[in-house]
């Protein structure tokens, strides 16, 4: 680093800009494929109903976060246009096209992505109520001020990325320490690989590892989240301490963050949370420039190689975050720490965290249908979801960083006190054989035909042992717990 310019972090900027933009592509594609059946004009929780409530209610206007659909009426066609625009702009950044121009070009692209995706999240309700939505928004906003290839990255923006990683990792660590006892007695990962929302292809193998390994995992997690994040800021010392030592310490901290997130990628499906953290971890990895230093004499109207107007803008962003960061900083050390909370309408300088407690049993809500007239003597057939467990012989697939929103919400159902309103509408869509809704599934057992009855039943799932697998070739063992809703049928006419 050299004052205002982070001259050794050009590679970090490349990874940040292109990586964050790539995840915006994933987010817009996920929205393009899923928003309409979930939240569209005929969705499970129609966004236009939320917007109508917001327009007619003072409380609604106050609670609704900024969205273009406040000013332009929502329609599915406009949603599709917004998604395609986001995909095109984000893909251009991935290819490095805006970065070839002045810093204002990538800034405009990222601010457009941030505002466009915020417009979706703000009306996404429970299907967009995940911490990684806020993380993508905040990362996209910060990426807007990384500059272009012709200039060095601004130091203040690189430091803001370290602060983002710190809140993300240290916040998650503190949530765990303050949360369930299983994180303190080192047993959390004895259960978590099996009970996590959406297991991946290697989750069963990870679950069957020895108990001592799971305890080591928890210790490693606490070290990576509670100790390592402090060292991300070490390169700042390079402004006063000669030599490569501070930069190396920061790079090692970033590498540890990346390595631990790669293990989570291998053993689970957490949408783009782990992938974003990996991208952000590169912000701490500096590589010396070719000549080891910036130019000795700046041209007029530049400071440390940065155009003066650009330097003023980035410093203003730093000042803004300094003010906004008071609330998440206080939250980190609060007795009742908030998890995945935003303290302002623009979802900047947020509080993050995940899995403060770990469920010890896996209860799955399975939806079944039948074409028989008598539900008491019926043969029931199961609807198969893409990511959540169903068929006990099926190998879980790797979907992350793609986000299967319906599958995730299905995981939360057994954890609540009652079934959510959207779930009843989902059963009605199955009774109607609604094509858009059925495309969210892996398999429709009725091949587009309407069932007569549907119901929801609960099963207890657990991974099979090695011995059980050799006999049954099944990866899951499940036991019926009972009917939780139904049978339901459409009324005639």
Image (cartoon, rainbow, N blue to C red):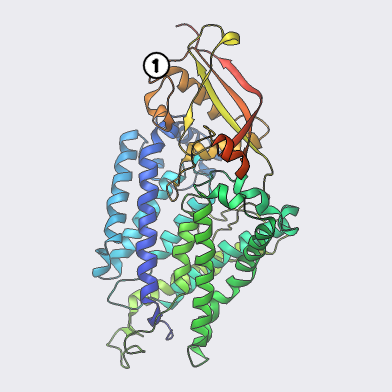
In the rendered structure, the answer to whether residue 317 lies left or right of residue 216 reads left
State whether residue 293 is above or below residue 336: below
Q: Is residue 71 visible?
A: no
Locate residue 317, reporting x and y percent. Answer: 45, 69
Locate residue 102, reporting x and y percent. Answer: 26, 71
Of residue 61 and residue 393, the one placed in the foreground of this image is 393
Of residue 171 and residue 454, the one placed in the foreground of this image is 454
State whether residue 135 is above or below residue 232: above
Q: Callout 1 environment at 10 Å: few (<14), some (14 to 19), or many (20+)?
A: some
Of residue 322 and residue 126, the one placed in the foreground of this image is 126
* Residue 51 lies in quadrant: top left
Q: Quadrant of the N terminus?
A: bottom left
Q: Residue at x 71, y 57 (%)?
A: 183
Q: Is residue 423 visible?
A: yes
Q: Circle 1 sits on which residue?
A: 449
Of residue 435 and residue 38, the one placed in the foreground of this image is 435
Q: Quadrant of the C terminus?
A: top left
Locate residue 41, reporting x and y percent. Answer: 39, 29
* Residue 305 lies in quadrant: bottom left
Badge 1 element: loop
State whether residue 64 is above or below residue 458: below
Counting labels gives 1
In the rendered structure, the answer to whether residue 381 lies left or right of residue 448 reads right
Q: Residue at x 54, y 70 (%)?
A: 256
Q: Residue at x 38, y 71 (%)?
A: 13
Locate residue 483, reporting x and y percent. Answer: 64, 22
State whether residue 250 is above or below residue 405: below
């Amino acid at each position: 680093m050299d004052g205002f310019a982070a001259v050794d972090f050009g590679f970090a900027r490349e990874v940040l800009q292109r990586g964050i933009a790539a995840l915006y592509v994933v987010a817009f594609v996920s929205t393009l494929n899923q928003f309409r059946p979930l939240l569209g004009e005929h969705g499970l929780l129609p966004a236009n109903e939320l917007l109508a409530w917001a327009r007619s209610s003072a409380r609604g206007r106050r609670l609704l976060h900024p969205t273009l659909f406040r000013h332009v009426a929502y329609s599915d066609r406009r949603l599709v246009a917004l998604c395609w625009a986001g995909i095109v702009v984000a893909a251009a950044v991935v290819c490095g096209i805006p970065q070839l121009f002045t810093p204002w070009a990538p800034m405009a692209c990222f601010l457009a992505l941030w505002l466009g995706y915020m417009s979706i999240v703000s009306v996404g309700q429970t299907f967009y109520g995940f911490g990684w939505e806020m993380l993508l928004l905040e990362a996209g906003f910060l990426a807007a001020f990384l500059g272009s290839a012709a200039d060095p990255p601004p130091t203040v923006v690189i430091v803001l990325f370290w602060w983002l990683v710190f809140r993300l990792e240290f916040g998650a660590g503190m949530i765990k320490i303050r949360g369930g006892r299983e994180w303190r007695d080192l047993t959390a990962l004895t259960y978590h690989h099996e009970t996590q929302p959406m297991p991946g292809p290697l989750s069963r193998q990870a679950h069957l590892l020895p108990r001592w390994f799971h305890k080591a995992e928890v210790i490693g997690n606490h070290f990576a989240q509670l100790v390592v994040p402090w060292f991300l800021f070490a390169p700042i010392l390079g402004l006063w301490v000669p030599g490569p030592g501070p930069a190396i310490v920061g790079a090692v901290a970033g590498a540890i963050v990346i390595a631990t997130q790669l293990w989570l990628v291998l053993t689970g499906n957490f949408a783009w949370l782990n992938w974003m953290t990996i991208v952000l971890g590169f912000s701490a990895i500096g590589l010396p420039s070719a000549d080891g230093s910036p130019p000795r004499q700046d041209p007029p109207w530049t400071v440390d190689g940065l155009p003066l107007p650009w330097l003023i803008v980035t410093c203003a962003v730093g000042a803004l975050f300094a003010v906004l960061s008071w609330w998440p900083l206080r939250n980190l050390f609060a007795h009742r720490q908030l998890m995945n909370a935003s303290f302002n309408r623009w979802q900047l300088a947020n509080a993050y965290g995940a899995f403060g407690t770990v469920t010890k049993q896996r209860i799955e809500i399975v939806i079944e249908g039948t074409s028989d007239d008598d539900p008491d003597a019926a043969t029931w057939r199961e609807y198969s979801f893409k990511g959540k467990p169903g068929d006990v012989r099926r190998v879980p697939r790797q979907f992350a960083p793609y986000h299967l929103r319906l599958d995730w919400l299905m995981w939360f159902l057994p954890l609540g006190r009652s079934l959510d309103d959207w779930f009843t509408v989902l059963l009605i869509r199955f009774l109607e054989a609604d094509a858009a809704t059925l495309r969210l599934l892996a398999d429709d057992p009725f091949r587009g035909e309407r069932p007569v009855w549907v119901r929801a039943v609960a099963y207890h799932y657990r991974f099979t042992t090695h011995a059980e697998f050799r006999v049954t070739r099944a990866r899951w063992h499940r036991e019926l717990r009972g009917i939780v809703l139904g049978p339901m049928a459409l009324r005639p006419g």
